[in-house]
Amino acid sequence: DQQVKQNSPSLSVQEGRISILNCDYTNSMFDYFLWYKKYPAEGPTFLISISSIKDKNEDGRFTVFLNKSAKHLSLHIVPSQPGDSAVYFCAASEDQAGTALIFGKGTTLSVSS
Amino acid sequence: DVKVTQSSRYLVKRTGEKVFLECVQDMDHENMFWYRQDPGLGLRLIYFSYDVKMKEKGDIPEGYSVSREKKERFSLILESASTNQTSMYLCASSLPGLAHTQYFGPGTRLTVL
């Protein structure tokens, strides 16, 4: 059973608008969540993370929101840029010291100019 | 600058061949990981290692083995390649206790004919 779910395989947004990528999880023991970004022919790169003791973490144009009661997190990109077009993976860990991450299937974001 | 390198970007092998995928990191990281990425399935953990000569099975270890003789090198071995092992293989490394700082290599696109 999938513990981390990204139910939207793809998302298309116009440049300058907001991109919202969603992620749901089922394991209540997860307490650290991350977003990775992947361009074709490259490995994933870490984007932003959030601990379960917080409900929001912001880094420039990127903000991650966590709703623990709903077991849901989202990544907001404002404003979206064509260079943000990539596959975004949500990942979770049972503790910050965990050695393995559980990844979602990914959402392909396309930002058109 | 941190670096994870993988021996080949593209590899074509025949069914039944023994295949070695090599990964080297120059960051003195204790943890190393092997994932495979397939369309619609995201990143799935095959094996990971938290120290030299140590290994742990991930979610899909069947058909694979690993070797970690030196801290900087983690090898993935396909004992007898099969067509369902055609995939993108990604290596990553991290410091212990910092699951979010997994640094990924560029990936090896393996095709088994």
Image (spheres, grey):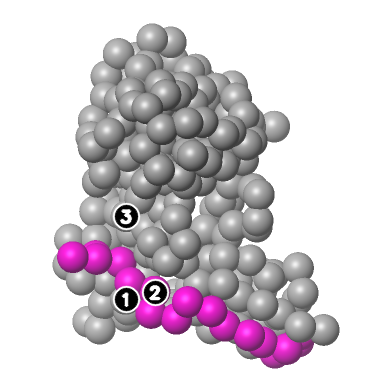
State the residue at coordinates (47%, 46%).
B87
Q: Given the image, on which type of amino acid does mark 2 rest? A: Gln
Chain letter for mark 2:
A
Residue depth check, mark 1 versus mark 2: number of the one nearer the observer: 2
Q: Which residue is mark 2?
A: A6
Q: Which mark is residue A87?
A: none
| Residue range (magenta) | A1-17
Work out whether B92 lies above or below A49.
Answer: above
- Badges 3 and 2: C-beta atoms under 8 Å apart? no
Write down the residue under mark 3: A102
Q: CA distance from mark 1 to mark 2?
A: 7 Å
Question: Can I make out residue A67 in this image?
Answer: yes
Label whose residue precedes the other's in the sequence (3 or 1): 1
Disc 3 to disc 1, C-alpha distance: 12 Å
SS category of the residue bearing label 2: loop
User: Which comes sooner in the sequence, label 1 or label 2?
Assistant: 2
Q: Name, please, the residue furthest toward the top.
A: B69
Residue topped by disc 1: A24
The image position of residue A79, as x and y in percent, is 71, 82
Q: Residue at x 57, y 60 (%)?
A: A37
Mark 3 closeness class: few <14, some 14–19, many ≥20 residues within 10 Å: many
Q: Are marks 3 and 1 on the same chain?
A: yes
Say whether residue B89 is visible: no
Crowdedness of circle 2 by 10 Å Cα count: few (<14), some, many (20+)?
many
Query: Does the residue at mark 1 contact the one at mark 2 (Cβ under 8 Å)?
Result: yes
